[in-house]
Amino acid sequence: MDFTTSLFVLSTIFLLLLILKQTKLISSKSIKNLPPGPPKLPIIGNLHQIGDKPHVSTASMARKYGPLISLRFGQQLVVVASTPEAAIGILKTQDRLLSSRVVPTAFQQPELLPHSLIWSECNSTWKSLRTLCRTEMFSAKALEAQSKLREQKLGNLLTFLHKTQGRVINIQDAVFTTLFNTLSSIIFGKDLIDYEDEHGARDELKESLYSIIEYGGRIKDVGSFFPMLEGFDLHGIRKGTMKEFDKAFSYWDDIIEERRAQVNSSTWSSDQAQSFLDRMLEKRFTNNQINQVVTELFVAGTNTTTSTVMWAMSEFVRHKEVMSKLEEEVKREFNSDTITSSQLSKLTYLQACIKENFRLHPSVPLLLPHKAAETCEVMNYTIPKNTKIFVNVWAMGRDPNLWDDPLSFNPERFIDSKLDYKGQDFELLPFGSGRRICPGLPSGIKTIESLLVSLIREFEWALPNGDDPSKLDMNDKFGIALRREKPLKLIFKEKIV
Ligand code: HEM
């Protein structure tokens, strides 16, 4: 054994002993009255039982151990809630104490974290950023102002689709581009990516954001299970994410600087402000602050919405009778080219389909990880300070105690139901609930509704090669957003009206 190998072996043994000691120390503190859970192995705890689909593995543990279970991922204590009662305990009764965040390794970037909306504790930065987003991006007034823009972007999508008619397309790419440009127009006042830009600069931006999302969604990240190893960035996650952040930032630094000059000029008046960027510049945000907030909005806003539309289109193609009813409804209610909010609100069958789709395919199946800021009690169990908390909304959507025939796609179940996804009905929580509820809910829903209406109204959709729709592969892949494992490839033809 040469010197380097010996050194490596010795340091590995030393680290393992240290971890073992620390793990023992933690468990020997014998926290009383934790929620039940499967037996834990030394050092790794329950990590070996989680697999690539934590929403599925923890749902199956909940069936055995109950609505609130405790696990250990290395040194990190984890609690998972899987029923509406347990979700109420976390997101309502103890909302104040359990709304802190555990920051994934990818986003532990000292220069960026202080400006984060998603990963901050519920502190004053978080409060002011949420208020800014609520008033400038998601208020009824802001949504109304964005409706023209939304329509333009849908028009671009339809033009692209009309051009590609007859070809098999990966519909996900086209939908992602539309959603991305809708958001970039709201934020920056311009489109940032193209439908066909193979390997151009804009394509690189798309790739960087995909990579950030991929890094952020990694679940097997040793550093986050053993805080003492955090500094080592063993899988290069922090470094890799920062590289992608830098690429994205350099892309929009130019846009920010150009606009900053205009906003700072003596001729600027507030009624010239057109975009979210203008509002941030008026409030004297630095480039670092803007870059961080903007990246988070893109990461949180585009993938969730794209994957929701993809699951919905998959279900519609699989269920011909659902698609026919939707087509009838859309034809009945829309007799002009524009799509207005009041028309959308009349589409009761579409609303039912969207709820049913959220029930079976919530795009953030475990919500984002919450953290206990203080020790407290939920369902008479102790949740110690710093516990990482997940709410398995995917499991709730498929629970036979809550839904008849839970695995079938049946929008009719929502037709005469008052159940909604806005955070008050705890059996259906695709956006979460309480103080961390998704602030983008109103915008996300508007986008999903108008996109689906456009796709259904203009085209007839089918699987390529006459494939049997009932055999469409519906496997999912866990990440920041729960997406289809295999991309949805469809063919389509224009409708003859
Ligand atoms: C189908 C669409 C969407 C779904 C299903 C969704 C779902 C969620 C969920 C489950 C959370 C975490 C809640 C929690 O931790 O308890 C969240 C947080 C968040 N979402 Fe969304 N979201 C969607 C669209 C959007 C859009 C369009 C935006 C913005 C453009 C957005 C911005 C955010 C932000 C900033 C947070 C973090 C809030 C905080 O930590 O205080 N989301 N979203």
Image (cartoon, rainbow, N blue to C red):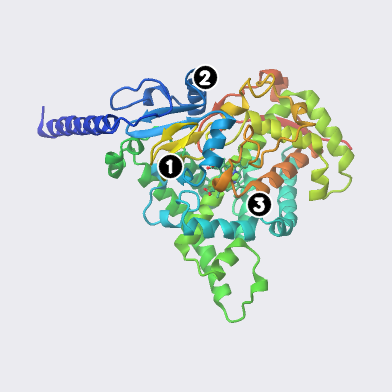
Vertical placement of residue 497 versus 257, above or below: above
Check disc 2 and report the residue beneath it. Answer: 63
Query: 245 or 412: which is nearer to us?
Result: 412
Q: Is 103 placed above or below 280 here?
A: above
Q: Disc 2 and disc 3: Cα gap in Å? A: 41 Å
Q: What residue is rendered at 73% in x and 28% in y? A: 316
Please, what is the three-letter code of the amino acid marked with disc 2?
Arg
Q: For mark 1, give the secondary structure.
A: loop
Residue closer to the observer: 187 or 462? 187
Disc 1: CA contacts within 10 A as few (<14), some (14-19) or many (>=20)? many
Name the quadrant containing residue 304: top right
**Which residue is identified by label 3?**
182
Distance between mark 3 and mark 1 Cα atoms = 36 Å
Out of 437 and 145, give the one closest to the viewer: 437
Residue occupying image coordinates x 57% and y 28%? 83
Identify whether 34 is placed above or below 174: above
Label 2 sits on a secondary structure element that is helix
Q: Amino acid at mark 3?
A: Thr
Q: Residue at x 73, y 53 (%)?
A: 152
- The label on residue 372 is 1
> Observer-nearest residue: 253 or 11?
11
Q: Amino acid at mark 1?
A: Ala
